[in-house]
């Protein structure tokens, strides 16, 4: 295979995948302009269904706007806690965002006028979201390779955030990304470390030919 990467490069790709973390703890600082550009370019090189490139990135620069986003997230944290019922207090003890501490705050949204893109979406319209998620993952892995932490915050009301950011009709925010220097990366995913959930065995998730039920209770 003439295009196969070197063993060192292959190992680096898998290392970034395995060591990527959804970060919530940031140490302030800044992200150099050229580094941020590389990360956004990495996101923009993601695959997209029908080559629609549905992702849009809004860089939040004004402190007042960052605080307004933080306030919206806090409101959704409370609503989520109530919906979790018996796990409410356990959830509220978690740190689920780093909005006030991260160096860069970005909002990722799906563009407007997506209905005209039918290629690959006629029966699966949600493939626009899948495409944008690939862009976010690209950026996540590139950030980890650059030694920067990134966290995906999904605790917000899309319509409230859309209004705050003066987004056009038909667009849809899907992520608040916290990005910046960190003191260190979690050894394991944070929610695994605190006992919220555990990684499932890959053998329980792979099937052959037809769907086979697994006994998740052992």
Image (tube, rainbow, N blue to C red):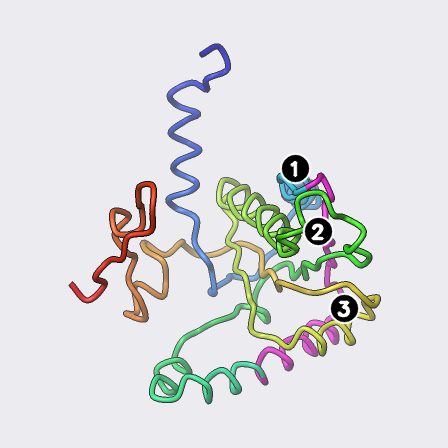
Q: Residue 141 appears at what percent x and percent y? A: 51, 43
User: Within 10 angstroms of label 2, few (less than 14), some, or many (20 or more) residues?
Assistant: many
Determine whether the residue tagged by mark 1 lies in a helix, strand or loop: loop
Q: Nearer the viewer, mark 1 or mark 3?
A: 1
- Left or right side of 103 for 111: right
How far apart in space, not on screen, are marks 2 and 1 (Cα)? 11 Å
User: Which stretch appears magenta?
Assistant: 50-75
First in sequence: mark 2 vs mark 1 = 1
Residue position for label 1:
45
The quadrant of the picture occupied by the C terminus is: bottom left
Q: Identify the residue shown where x is 71% and y is 78%.
A: 160
- Left or right side of 157 for 217: left
Depth check, front residue: 215 or 165 = 215
Marks 2 & 1, CB-CB < 8 Å contact: no
Residue position for label 2:
55
Q: Is residue 190 above or below residue 65?
A: above
Q: Nearer the viewer, mark 2 or mark 3?
A: 2
- Left or right side of 206 for 111: right
How far apart in space, not on screen, are marks 2 and 3 (Cα)? 22 Å
């Amino acid at each position: 295979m003439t295009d196969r990467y070197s063993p060192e490069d292959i190992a680096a790709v898998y290392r970034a995948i395995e060591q990527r973390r959804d970060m919530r703890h940031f140490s302030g600082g800044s992200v150099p302009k050229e580094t941020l550009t590389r990360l956004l370019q990495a996101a923009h090189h993601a695959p997209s269904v029908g080559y629609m490139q549905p992702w849009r990135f809004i860089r939040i620069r004004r402190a007042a706007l960052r605080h307004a986003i933080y306030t919206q997230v806090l409101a959704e944290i409370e609503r989520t806690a109530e919906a979790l019922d018996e796990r409410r207090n356990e959830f509220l003890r978690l740190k689920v965002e780093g909005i006030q501490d991260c160096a860069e705050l970005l909002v990722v949204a799906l563009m407007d006028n997506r209905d005209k893109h039918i290629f690959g979406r006629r029966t699966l319209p949600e493939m626009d979201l899948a495409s944008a998620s690939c862009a976010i993952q690209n950026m996540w892995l590139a950030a980890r390779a650059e030694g920067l932490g990134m966290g995906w915050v999904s605790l917000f009301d899309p319509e409230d955030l859309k209004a705050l950011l003066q987004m056009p009709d038909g667009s849809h925010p899907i992520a608040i990304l916290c990005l910046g220097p960190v003191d260190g990366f979690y050894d394991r995913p944070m929610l695994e470390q605190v006992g919220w959930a555990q990684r499932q065995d890959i053998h329980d998730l792979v099937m052959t030919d037809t769907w086979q039920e697994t006994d998740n209770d052992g």
